[in-house]
Amino acid sequence: MTLHLPPILTYALRRLVQAVPVIVLIMIGTFLLLKLAPGDTVDALVGDMGGADAAYIARLRTEYGLDQPVWVQLWLYMVKLVQFDFGWSFVYEESVATILLERLGTTLMLMATSLSIAFTVGCFLGAFAARRAYSLTDNVISTVGLVFYATPSFFLSLMMILLFSVQLGWLPVGGIKTVAGFYTGWDHVVDVARHLIMPTAALSLIYLSFYLRLMRASVLEVADLDFVRTARAKGAGETRLMVHHIMRNALLPVITLLGMQFSTVLGGSVVVETIFSLPGLGQLAYQSVIQRDMNMLMGIIFLCAIIVVVVNFLTDLLYARLDSRIELA
Amino acid sequence: MIQKKVALRASLGSAALCALSVMTTGAASAEDAPKHGGTAIIHMASEQRALNPALRASTGVYNITGKIMEPLIDKSYDGYEPVLATEWSTSDDGKHITVKLREGVKWHDGEPFTCADVSFSAMELWKKLLNYSSTLQQNLDSVDCTDDFTAVFNYSKPMPLSLFVAAMPDLGHPVAKHLYEGTDILKNPYNTAPVGTGPFKFVEYERGQYVMAERNPDYWRGEEFPYLDRIVWRFIRDKSAAAAALESGEVHESGFNGVSMSDIERLSKDERFEVGTMGYENNVAHSTVEFNHRNPIMADLKVRQAMYHGLDIDYAIKTIMRGFAKPGRGPVPSAGGANYTDQVTTYDYDPELAMKMLDEAGYPVKDDGFRFHLRHRPAPWGEYTQLWGEYYAQAMREIGIDVEILTNDAPGFLNGVYRDYDFDTANGWHQFRSDPAVSTMVWLRSGAPAGTPWSNQFGWQSDEMDTMIDEAQAELDPEKRAADYHAIQAKSMDEIPVIFAIEHPFISVTSTKLKNHHNTPRWNSSSWYDLWLDE
């Protein structure tokens, strides 16, 4: 008997099946790459402690299972992962899943806000600049965009701290909330928001420039196409022309970029989260590499791989929705 | 360097200890009556996840837990001072150490502190699980409780009382037996939510953000103490962000060189801060040059002597450590009290002599402009070590030795040097922990299992040195013991298995709002019961 599913579900299922080997390969590759790096988590731990004797080190290695051959370690890890058991972090002395869940919220909040701002404002400014191409306005917008594009995120973040925290004293230097502030309810929300202003702004400003530049180029390209001329000849107003004919088509490459950037924003947030001491996934990933916290790092990579696969899937769906020439197959 | 700088000379036991480059302790303002209340916020550059000093001997751990859990004995500028122990003595044969414990002390959960806690901690944690301590206490057979407040430590071989006492501030923190007995000690939840007897009670640990402790109203020193309501340790990894947090008033203190040297220098001119090295005498570290003696060139004493002459130590102290350091004189730093001597061979900076000695040793300059090539691993322990490594390479090039720097992170460095021996020279630092027997002697004693970091993995072995180290460790007479360590120091400066080039304490930046700070030689690790905030 053949099962008749709606095309969207068939498509989703097929994508899911395709994703499994991709994720398995990513996990094995990551595991082996990490094993190639000199030293393990016990080395990092005693490095942090400033020293330990041989018996202590040997005991830790046995306890962490690091005395086993690499292939055994990999096999044991994969067997657990299939059951969605991410294992134990010896660095944090806590289960990896617990810590990932703790951190995911901060990173998602940071990512979602920054990307939304960057995408919306970037697209708007890009389209605005394109409609006034080569004018003074366009030049100013493009140049400012280029400056932010070229500014390293650590520099931008530190300069913002110097200005808004040290000089003006308007915003807190870092952290997710005021320590020993004991705020509750609405005050707590405001407090967290105040702590997120600078990191969000830093990430947004850098990513905004991508969208701005791409949208500007895309709008310029689409605006010259035949169907736009036809629509204009039919008497469509400039606003209608822009919204229904140009923007809709010009957005396609920009949405591709949005999907792709979801993964890089996780990477970008390593720097921003570290400087602003935000307890997110980026900071955790950075720490985990330094600490050689295998299980934690594998957990983060797994999570990121899933996010990227899901976002790519959603991007494709959105594509089909925006451009009827594209079919899900 | 700073106007408010006050020269300080502190005595430690019988030996006078010269603080290196010094700062105030907030002493002028401390004459005002201390105020109660307030939250002190302290910067931590790295996050300490384990919060049990009886499982993990590390200054980063003591930094937080020192306020919550107390040792039997602590160290002040006047010598060793009783905390949970009130008196200590030893038997004639040195095998039985009797410790009288403080009565009327309560754990934070209300249970009384007794000898049972000490006995359990010593046998189950200090002897079995605590780094460094497991070596120190390897001959500990049992701890008997003759009554609730008298503990007798029984050793199979003599244990010098002075060594026992010197080790206690770091390696003598009891845990509550009733919370640990019958549990998997390493996975015990109190390891990250400590219960102690100290002036502050643990409140919460928000991973990646901070640890918070609050005032213990039942503290045994009396109702007066502690002054502060709360202490918060904030984790800020980025040094520039930490400096900004100090300047914006979000953080009151950053210790252990938590901000960069350029920021330290800048903030030392800022009236809102006190900058200096006081309070770190017990945490002095040596910046080293380590040799791989398996390389025949490095095994040649004349070459090592020449290389020592090629190093301009004073220049390095002035430029890299901004004057906050002094030249090393072997494995015991000047903070080592009676065990330290400066009566040792020294090697003045003399590049001409260095080059002459290298010629004589049979290493003339070859066609490529160099005598020989070395692969060097600098330890990634922060700014000092990185820069010291770079300076070393530069200085060696000037006397015709080509040094290639291999950059690595912590696990890479520890493996490259101590396990794989994949280096010709290396530089790092090693921390002195009150007594040479529990710290720097591991650099010279042979026989450490292969791969043990911070130990003699250099391929250097001397039966005479091994015997000297063992005898000093077991010597019960403090004067003879000191003489033994002087001899070891002299021998190490003659044979240079390792160059203990520079001894440097750490530097802290403290807000002038904090009072009574840095008033003990291991201040960041101490209990802060007398610290107060002028806000």
Image (spheres, grey):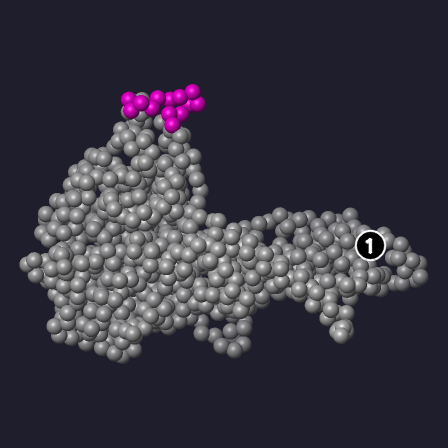
Residue at the right extreme, as displayed: A234
Residue B188: image quadrant is bottom left
Which residues are drawn in magenta? B360-372
Residue A237: image quadrant is bottom right
Three-letter residue code for mark 1: Val
Image x and y of residue B383, in percent: 40, 46
Image x and y of residue B88, in percent: 13, 63
- The chain ID associated with circle 1 is A
Image x and y of residue A256, in percent: 71, 58
Left/right placement of residue A164 relative to residue B69 reads right
Residue shown at the point (25%, 46%) measured from the top left? B447
Nearer the observer, B213 or A183? B213
Residue shown at the point (37%, 62%) measured from the top left? A63
* Quarter of the image that includes the N terminus of chain A: bottom right
Residue shown at the point (23%, 70%) measured from the top left? B120
Residue A319: image quadrant is bottom right
Residue shown at the point (54%, 71%) measured from the top left? A190
Nearer the observer, A279 or B360? B360
Give neighbour class at mark 1: few <14, some 14-19, many 20+ (Cα, 10 Å). some
Residue at the top extreme, as displayed: B367
Name the residue that disc number 1 marks.
Answer: A222
Image x and y of residue A130, in percent: 78, 53
Q: Is residue A121 visible?
A: no
* Quarter of the image that includes the C terminus of chain A: bottom right
**Magenta span contains residue B305:** no
Nearer the observer, B187 or B37? B187
Q: Is residue B73 visible?
A: yes
Nearer the observer, B453 or A261? B453
